Image: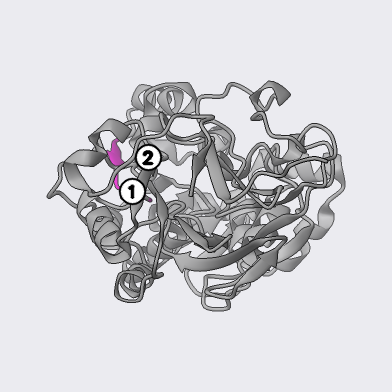
Amino acid sequence: MIELPSGFRGRIHRGTQQIGGTCVELEASGERILLDLGLPLDADEVSETLLPDVAGLRSPNPALRAIVISHGHGDHWGLLPLCKPNVPLAMGAATARIMSAAAPFVPNFFAPDLSYELRDRKPVEIGPFRVTPYLVDHSAYDAYALLIEAEGRRLFYSGDIRAHGRKGALFERMVTHPPQGVDTMLMEGSSLGRLDEDARFPTESEIEARLVESFTAPGFVAISASAQNIDRMVSIYRACKRTGRTLLLDLYAMEMLKATGNANLPAAGWSNLSVYVPEYQRRQIKRTERFDLLEPYKQARIYREHMTEIGDRTVMLFRPAMMRDVEAANLWPKARAVWSQWDGYLKDGPGAKLKSDLADLGVPFEVIHTSGHASIADLKRLATAIEASRLIPIHTFEGDRFQTYFRNVTRRQDGEWWEV
């Protein structure tokens, strides 16, 4: 007779010593779920060697009941395409739609087949686990913290969270109406080591104000931002409206906005918004015969000739593959560039090359961005509100510093089993 493990236990496969690549395995009554299955940020490629040592990822194992994805950033789901068996998936419906919409444009994205849909504070039963999602403020749309209950014990996983975005009210709701009786809390600590204890990140409204200031000066603006950062897309669009500019979005960005299912977000037909299809996307559409992607945007589409005419009054959501488009429209001589994502991407790789190429062209360059993660002060508010019996650092390079700021901290190592 096989003796099944008793109680409710867990282990972090990645995250106790690093940001990104997050994966947490939970076990109760001999059955298991995973919270996230992320691609490490420093991975050179998506490789099966990166899969954590979890029974059921490389070959079927019915004891692995589901993989629960907290949100749509690749460092939390990027290893899903490597799973050989059809492990049931749980995530928000908008997250699944965004991933599906991104698939024709971005490598590694795919259309998820959901077995469980995460909805704000609506419990889902997965085997012996009761999973309650909490919609949170983050730079990814449709992001959740997760309360997991099993065997009379409660674990709360913060996922990636902040209080200073456009959905900051969700954080305030969390700290005023937190989950009760939490035994173990896994809390992200991305800002530790990057921010002083009393410092704060700019709010998204403050970012919008800085964009307005930047856009007020004449000249073409190329802004680099993630099209999946919906808060930032709204800030850029609003800043364009406030300064009388036209925002040029490509097909990928338009499809991301549409995939949210939110009618209050910029869409084809809105004022101060046009669709520009860069050369690399035209070639991609022709190669894949996805001409259907063009159809919804015919009336809003702008072509290179017109872009040249109105360049001084436009802002283009820009990525390095569009360099030649801007050059062909003769817009670089009076252009300036705004980097509106993590400045760490400028240190090497494509970000560093872009900055160097723009410098060679004499294009002024500025950074206007805020973090997708909570400040230390807001993390302290969250930890105090939830009052977990045990707080375990995750998604951080600075786990050893948690005891400086938080109570009831217990350090764990990657791969180490512990009782919830």
Location of residue 382 (image quadrant) = bottom left
Note whether 356 is above or below 91 in the view shown: above
Note whether 307 is above or below 208 in the view shown: above
Q: Which residue is mark 2?
A: 342
Front position in the image: 123 or 257: 123
The answer to whether residue 298 is seen in the rendering is no
Location of residue 267 (image quadrant) = bottom right
Kind of residue sitting beneath label 2: Trp
Front position in the image: 367 or 121: 121
Residue 211 position within the rendered picture, expressed as x and y whole percent measured from the top left: 30, 56
88 part of magenta stretch: no
Instruction: Left or right? Give the position of 368 relative to 133.
Output: left
Q: Which residue is mark 1?
A: 371
Kind of residue sitting beneath label 1: Ser
Binning the other alpha carbons within 10 Å of mark 2 as few (below 14), some (14 to 19) or many (20 upward) gives some
Residue 57 position within the rendered picture, expressed as x and y whole percent measured from the top left: 75, 36
Location of residue 56 (image quadrant) = top right
Residue 5 position within the rendered picture, expressed as x and y whole percent measured from the top left: 65, 44
Give SS at disc 2. Answer: loop
- Image point (77%, 62%), residue name: 115
Identify the coloring: one colour
- Image point (42%, 52%), residue name: 184
Of mark 1 and mark 2, the one earlier in the sequence is: 2
Instruction: Left or right? Give the position of 112 relative to 156.
Output: right
Residues at discs 1 and 2 in contact (Cβ within 8 Å): yes
> Which span is picked out in magenta?
364-372
The answer to whether residue 173 is seen in the rendering is yes
365 part of magenta stretch: yes
Give SS at disc 1. Answer: loop
Secondary structure of the magenta portion, mostly?
loop
Residue 88 position within the rendered picture, expressed as x and y whole percent measured from the top left: 77, 54
Binning the other alpha carbons within 10 Å of mark 1 as few (below 14), some (14 to 19) or many (20 upward) gives many
